[in-house]
Image (cartoon, helix red, strand yellow):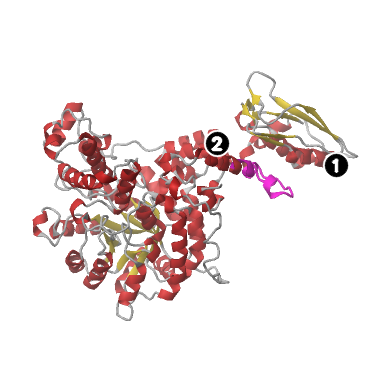
Amino acid sequence: CRVTTENPEKDFAPDTGTLSVYRHSAGCGIRMDGIGYSGLTITPYYDSMLVKYTARGSDFPETLARMKRVLQECRIRGVMTNIPFLLNVLTHPEFETGIVTTSFIDDHPELKKISSSRWNFASSRQSDQRKVGRLERSLRYFANLAVNGHPPELGADPTKLSTSHADTTKSLLPDVEKSASDAVGGMRKILLEEGPEGYAKFVRNNKQLMITDTTWRDAHQSLLATRMRTSDIVRCAPFTNAALSQAFSLEMWGGATFDVAMRFLNECPWERLEKLREQVPDIPFQMLLRGANAVGYTNYPDNVVYEFCKQAHKSGIDIFRVFDSLNYVENMELGIKAAAASGGFVEAAMSYTGDVSDPSRGKYNLEYYLDLAKQLVDLGAHSLAIKDMAGLLTPRAAQMLVGALREQHPDTVIHVHTHDTAGAGVASMLAAAEAGADVVDAAFDAMSGLTSQPSLGALIANVRGTEKDTGMSLSDIGPLNTYWENVRQLYAPFESGQLSGSSDVYVHEIPGGQYTNLLYQSRQLGLTEKWPQIKKKYAEANIILGDIPKVTPSSKVVGDLAQFMVAQNLEMKDVAEQADTLAFPESVVQYLRGEIGVPPGGFPEPLRSTVLKSRGLEPIEGRPGAALEEYKFEEAEALLKSKYGEASISDKDVLSHALYPNVFIDWKNFEAVNGDVGNLPTHLFLNPL
């Protein structure tokens, strides 16, 4: 057999590079002709053969077995070789008979599809082409990390990296006995048997306060910059399934978790969803869907949003919380219809801002939210959610808004989400429950408070023994609290440094996740003393842009303008007077053009007209993504398979690429060099030495 540096899947095109590992095979009946060594540079200007092996034996089966073994034991890393192709040939049943013709390869083109190769070898590491070289790739990741450290964009504070390699989370949770039956139980059983309408009816008739646990998504998105890895969630999944089987849902996917999985954690977001679904059969899974933006920061063709929702539901999502960052109903309508078409439970969320209990706060009064709620219910939502991104919903406001919604929609499930930035989260959720809310969001104590959600344990304790009793036990969630306390210590490099609540959120209105990100960034840039100024400018930027709801992506627009004002030392009047000459951040220009929708009350004038005219831009009328052409999935799939191999690309990968093309390609390139780092324990992933 001639071992060459060629790629069989690309018609044996020569590959080039440097041999990172080169180790010959040897043994009885084997002759080796060739030279090579680790560090050898392979150029395109010579014969691509590296080595030739010749095998002999007492008969053909023995000779064949020796050649298979020599190819398995040969170690050549750093360049593509034809070894998988040779193994495909040698293991083919027809070839093993010893009777083939010169047309054998032409008759069996599947032999060249090496990325999907599987062989019946004794070694599991050598029987699957995807596993070949895994150890070398992991070592390459460790070596690069030890020498160069984490890339700055990961956001890990190197001074907080633990030097201990003891896994303190491994044995914290007791084993959970698995049922002999595969039947689904808990709340999800009702959802699957009765459907979304039946589940909504059950929740509405239920007198107990139901809980959505956000620990697996928004809690770590708010506290730890969304850096929680799949392995740490999977480890506690069986125990969570048992402890929270009476929960309305687990919010565990969507939002920023999708792109961060590929962009920073180098994991597949779909694998996270499917692994957790396998471990948690009894609790409905909930995701955050950004309306027409799906899980992205831009507009997508309608068929992308529909296909995404269809696959998400197929992979395990039960409940879609659909929102729009500007409460633009046309954007939400697409998300609601796509989620409904997938067969999922649709929860339409109103992004809350202002203060309904303060008549002086202008347009965001009870009438505004009641009108918005009616439109969403008319679109077919199974439940209504109040999405309080910054923690602005005071107990009094919660009582007023939920009470009014309950009176207007007596048969609709009402779900309330908040952040505990000011420290009033538990009080607000209790007030909402008393006013008629069916479900509230909370997080395990160790992952609650500050910019995260209110404490789950506190809510359970405060309604225990009343009509609103959650049916959950503090003793059941205790071990999980201990687990998350220890896990959170692993992620200390991603903590913002915030030590207490911040009641000035009622002034600047910065959303929970963005608050910690801005605080962390200011400290990394040595601008800690400017943090009060950044918060002040954020409030001013919000007014300049028209006093808008602030949640991704609209919150980024406000944040970008605030940082721009700080950097340029601009006051509000300066922005208005110099609007035709200032080099505004691109996100601000896109917002003013109408690329993320229309804000409540319309765009700020004359700012919008001035900025667009100075740049020669025309405003977008109507839903921004309505005019986009359909995404050509089949063409994209063919291109990706030609690049990465058929077995390496699934329908889910095509969707990931459609949503984040550059991020997906970067992740695939990283994986080709470093392998699947999702299998590494977190303490090694962050600091191997």
Q: Which residue is mark 2?
A: 644
Name the residue rendered at 20%, 34% in the picture: 619
Q: Front-most of 576 and 290?
A: 576
Question: Which percent across, then down, holds residue 288?
Answer: 35, 54
- Magenta: main secondary structure equals loop
Question: Which percent across, then down, holds residue 648?
Answer: 56, 41
Residue 62: which disc? 1
Q: From the viewer's perspective, is residue 464 above or below residue 643?
A: below
Q: CA distance from mark 2 to mark 1?
A: 35 Å
Residue type (three-letter) at the residue carrying disc 2: Tyr
In which quadrant of the rendered image does the N terminus lie? top right
Q: In this rendering, does residue 379 appear at all?
A: no
Which residues lie in the magenta part?
Answer: 117-137
Q: Residue furthest left?
A: 360
Name the residue rendered at 31%, 44% in the picture: 522
Q: From the viewer's perspective, is residue 681 above or below residue 562?
A: below
Name the residue rendered at 27%, 61% in the picture: 384
Q: Residue 564 occupies which quadrant of the picture?
A: top left
Relative placement, left or right, of 550 versus 230 is: left
**Label whose residue precedes the other's in the sequence (2 or 1):** 1
